[in-house]
Image: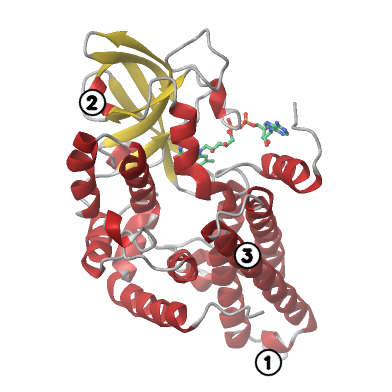
């Protein structure tokens, strides 16, 4: 059994590192931090130029046909550096759904634009009253001639402020069982009746609440079958519950090691020789390794279409985010008051990386399925316990 990613993946990783050094400049990083928006058109254009928008897609669909471990190397590196890839990944995720389930007209209309990084598509599943239970969506779409009238609201529509479309889950049959009366639409953001309002988060990321007031959407923007929206949405989100935050763990550990090698205590001894620091570093390194191995297993299971991915992927998300949260808190305690200064302060240690990660880590345990939901999935799918009520 070989636990390494392999030569092709390491080659790609080296290319991604070089690319990020060149393209993801300090100025761009500062711009993303200041706006809190996880999307940057200049960065997206550079990714497009490298042909990396659809690394793992089959070649016949316009992708590069890279194997899952290569895709993983790309993801690990971009996340480790906090590159603004979220807008790209939601757009390509929806594009993939369209390539599988869209009409020929939809493929012709949207895929070239997605491949040109000309459009941004945000995800509109969560509502103010339901998130984990997305199937309880109350936003409704009602037939109107050759289209639909959509009314409701979506919470946490990240990137809606820079998006062209929201991929929205709406209730089309209020009388059907909740998973069966839903349909997905691509709702153009820039039209009367759509309002995007900023929602600030603990980590400084900007997300949004989006309102839809009797918004007309032509039937040509319906993705998949009427009342078949649950299947469309879950096809798109298949990878979400297996998301891993090992990139963040890696980034935090690297910052801690740099700090420990550059900082001395009152007696002039390097912090890297301090047993408390070494203990934290050793533990973080081990936890990072476990996260990476869990993620590698998920990538292999996904490639094999192995159904055990459902519970095992959740382990990857759960472990990496909960350890990240603890790692961030304990690292900040170790560094002390110096670690509290934020980015932008010229005296901030590691440009505020430590205090930022404490705030950022909390969110990772919520989006892409909360820790409670992941634990439920693990209990149900790996131990055969009944579904949670
Ligand atoms: C920064 C950020 C960005 C996001 N971006 C997007 C986005 O772009 N698009 C989008 O659609 N959504 C997005 N989300 C929403 C995210 O997916 C939801 O917040 C998440 O699914 C939880 O839903 P909720 O907030 O409604 O909490 P709820 O589902 O109301 O849960 C509240 C609490 O109850 C617990 N709980 C719920 N059900 C169960 C159960 N069955 N068993 C045990 N415990 C349970 C939860 O774990 C949680 O602790 C984002 C969220 C954040 C914080």
Dot 1, crowdedness within 10 Å: few (<14), some or many (≥20)?
few
Q: Is residue 129 visible?
A: no
Q: For residue 289, what is the image quadrant?
A: bottom right
* Front-lying residue, 170 or 381: 381
Residue 209 drawn at (x, y percent): 42, 29
Assign a secondary structure to mark 2. helix
Q: Which residue is mark 1?
A: 268
Inter-mark Cα distance, 3 to 1: 44 Å
Quadrant in which ligand 1 is drawn: top right
The kind of secondary structure element at disc 1 is loop
Please report whichever mark, 3 or 1, sits nearer to the chain's N-terminal start: 1
Can you identify the residue that label 2 sits on? 220
- State the residue lying farthest toward the bottom: 268
Sequence order check, earlier mark of 2 and 3: 2
Of labels 1 and 2, the one closer to you? 2
Q: Nearer the viewer, residue 172 or 28?
A: 172
The relative height of residue 142 versus residue 116 in the rendered view (above or below) is above
Instruction: Give neighbour class at mark 3: few <14, some 14-19, many 20+ (Cα, 10 Å).
Output: some
Colour scheme of the picture: secondary structure
For marks 1 and 2 on the same chain, the one whose residue lies earlier in the sequence: 2
Who's the residue at 75% across and 31% down the image?
A: 388
Q: Is residue 72 visible?
A: yes
- Residue 42, given in percent of the width and then of the height, sits at 23, 60
- Above or below, comparing residue 68 to residue 305 in the picture: below
Q: CA distance from mark 1 to mark 2?
A: 69 Å
Residue at 31% across, 24% down: 195
């Amino acid at each position: 059994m070989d636990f390494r990613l392999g030569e092709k993946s390491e080659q790609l990783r080296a290319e991604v590192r070089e690319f990020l050094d060149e393209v993801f400049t300090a100025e761009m990083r500062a711009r993303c931090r200041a706006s809190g928006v996880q999307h940057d058109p200049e960065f997206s254009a550079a990714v497009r130029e490298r042909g990396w928008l659809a690394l793992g897609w089959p070649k016949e669909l316009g992708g590069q046909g890279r194997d899952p471990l290569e895709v993983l190397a790309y993801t690990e590196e971009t996340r480790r550096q906090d590159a603004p890839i979220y807008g790209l990944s939601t757009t390509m995720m929806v594009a993939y759904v369209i390539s599988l389930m869209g009409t020929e007209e939809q493929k012709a209309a949207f895929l070239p634009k997605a491949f040109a990084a000309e459009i941004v598509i945000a995800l509109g599943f969560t509502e103010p009253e339901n998130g984990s239970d997305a199937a309880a969506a109350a936003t409704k779409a009602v037939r109107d001639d050759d289209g639909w009238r959509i009314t409701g609201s979506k919470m946490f529509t990240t990137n809606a402020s820079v998006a062209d479309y929201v991929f929205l889950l709406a209730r089309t049959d209020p009388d059907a069982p909740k998973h069966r009366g839903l349909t997905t639409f691509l709702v153009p953001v820039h039209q009367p009746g759509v309002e995007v309002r900023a929602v600030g988060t603990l980590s400084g990321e900007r997300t949004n609440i989006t309102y839809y007031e009797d918004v007309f959407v032509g039937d040509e923007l319906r993705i998949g079958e009427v009342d078949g929206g649950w299947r469309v949405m879950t096809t798109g989100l298949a990878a979400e519950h297996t998301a891993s935050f090992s990139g963040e763990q890696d980034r935090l550990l690297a910052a801690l090691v740099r700090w420990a090698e550059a900082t001395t205590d009152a007696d002039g001894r390097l912090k890297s020789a301090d047993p408390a620091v070494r203990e934290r570093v050793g533990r973080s390194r081990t936890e990072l390794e476990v996260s990476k191995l869990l993620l590698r297993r998920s990538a292999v299971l996904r490639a094999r279409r192995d159904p055990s991915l459902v519970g095992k992927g959740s382990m990857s998300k759960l472990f990496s985010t909960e350890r990240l949260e603890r790692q961030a808190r304990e690292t900040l305690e170790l560094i002390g008051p110096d670690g509290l200064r934020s980015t932008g302060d010229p005296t901030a240690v590691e440009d505020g990386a430590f205090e930022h990660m404490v705030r950022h880590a909390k969110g990772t345990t919520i989006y892409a399925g909360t820790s409670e939901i992941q634990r439920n999935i693990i209990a149900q799918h790996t131990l055969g316990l009944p579904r949670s009520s």
